[in-house]
Amino acid sequence: RTDGTTDYYEIVQRVADLSILPGLRTEAWTYGGSFPGPTIVSRSGRRTVVHHRNELPQAAVVHLHGGHTPTASDGYPIDLILPAAGAGDGTPPMPDMPNMPMSAMMGDTRLGQRTYTYPMNQRAATLWYHDHRMGRTGLGVWRGLAGFHLVRDDESDALPLPRGQRDIPLMVTDRSFAADGSFRYPSAATAGVTDAYMNGVLGDVILVNGAPWPVLRTDPARYRLRLLNASNARRYRLELDPQPPGGAALVQVGSDGGLLDRPVAHDALEIAPAERFDVVVDFGRYRPGTRVRLVNRLGSGSTVDVMRFDVVGTDRADDSAVPDRLARATAVPDPHRAAATRTFLFHRRSDGTWTVNGDPYRPGRALARPKLGTVEVWRFITDFHHPVHVHLDPFRVVSRNAGDPGAYDAGWKDTVDVRPSEAVEVVTRFTDYPGRYLLHCHNLEHEDMAMMADFTVG
Ligand code: C2O
Ligand code: CU
Ligand code: CU
């Protein structure tokens, strides 16, 4: 629904039986009965209002990942949408937070529903929305609470990039299933906190848009593939097999925060949880009839294959192109003008606790207080592999281990893959909205084990 200034969406979060594996039913937690949830499409500069009703057996929180969102609608992990009447799962609706008054936590929550308002004062980009409940995000997303949210604007619409049926969002996830088809997720209650949980939960079946190892029939033409790694913890190195003659098959046109200034051609893409890579692939470079596998070079066995493109379509007509200049150059904040430089250490303590700067997450305790309108350099230092995500404003990667940014760091990002024992510097400007926001590891089990921190923009 739309009324000229605002686009409205209604989403009911509910349990649904999906058929993911042949002949079996999988009970999922869904946005609107499907996994992924419905794709929301917004116009840059035009408000989108999403009303969520929670008919799940648990509390929920909705976060628009990559959204430039006022704090009240950002999906703070204890801003819960309580289950609608009668749907409780027996766990207490509120986590035990002795230092937080109930009223401060509840925002505009009414029992069972909540309205999120997104001004969409941001560039065209591929965003996604997902559950963000305190301590349970990994479980919620694993069971299906994730969907795309695309932002369009005039600048990107004017480009001749592939569109319509040839512009395809691809949500890549891994899952494990029990013999009866149900999602298998290690439960701390029954299994204890195992190593498999500690390092982040991995599945052995790769799903793309909710389907295992799907096949897409393509024309011998250009396609825009908006790749999102929505896996809890798995990183991928994606490659086409076979490569077309000459390689460089994955032409990146966008990153988390929208179009790059100029395209970058890759043979392979490394994509960490929550990252997005917007790429153009020209299947016209293949002989008709070729079956092109999208493979994961970091996988083994069943986690190598991701999906397949069969170049069997006959429509050669293709008026798309990848221009040399994609976006008007955006003003990149100058790291030398930063008002502050801060260091965040993502580290597992010897007692097993995952921490940022030595402490597990506690809502309401800000690790940083950047001033609205200022530029800061944030340095992320890690022990293990941690995809570090910052809410509110996108950033640019300035350096890795004091050297140049990596091959996959181009453009505006909201998540950066920080490798073991690396120091990565990013620069950002805090704009438009004061208040309380999050930075955290987007390995969802690390996040749930409290590798997260607040920062307050003032
Ligand atoms: Cu995609 Cu704070 O999360
Ligand atoms: Cu986010
Ligand atoms: Cu981590």
Image (spheres, grey):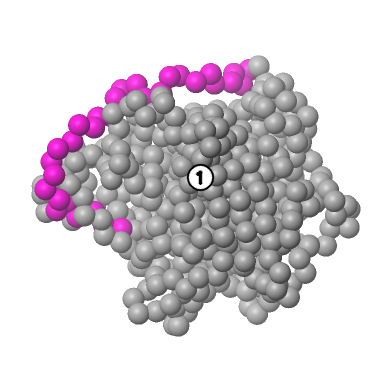
Q: Position of residue 297 (x, y in %)?
A: 35, 54
Determine the image quadrant of residue 154: top left
Rendered location of residue 439, percent (x, y): 67, 43
- Left-right relation of 335 to 24: right
Q: Inspect this view and state whether residue 311 appears.
A: yes
> Which residue is at the front of the view, 120 or 197?
120
Disc 1 marks a residue whose amino acid type is Arg
Taking the spot 75% from the left edge, 40% from the top edge, the residue there is 436
* Residue 65 visible here: no
Q: Residue at x 62, y 66 (%)?
A: 55
Judged from the image, the secondary structure of the residue bearing numbered disc 1 is: loop
Identify the residue at horizontal 30%, vertical 41% (top origin). 164
Which residue is nearer to you in this view: 70 or 442? 70
**Span colored in magenta:** 307-336
Q: Nearer the viewer, residue 440 or 25?
A: 25
Rendering coords of residue 219 (x, y %): 17, 47
**Relative to 161, is 191 above or below?**
below
Verify whether residue 103 appears in magenta: no
Quadrant holding the C terminus: top right
Task: Pick out the residue farthest to the bottom.
Answer: 180
Q: What residue is disc 1 on?
A: 1
Q: Is residue 242 above or below residue 328?
A: below
Dot 1, how many residues are within 10 Å of its Cα: few (below 14), some (14-19), or many (20+)? few
Q: Residue at x 41, y 41 (%)?
A: 277
Residue 399, compared with residue 58, is above or below; it is above
Q: What predominant SS class does the magenta segment belong to?
A: loop
Residue 313 lies within the magenta run: yes
Q: Residue furthest front?
A: 3
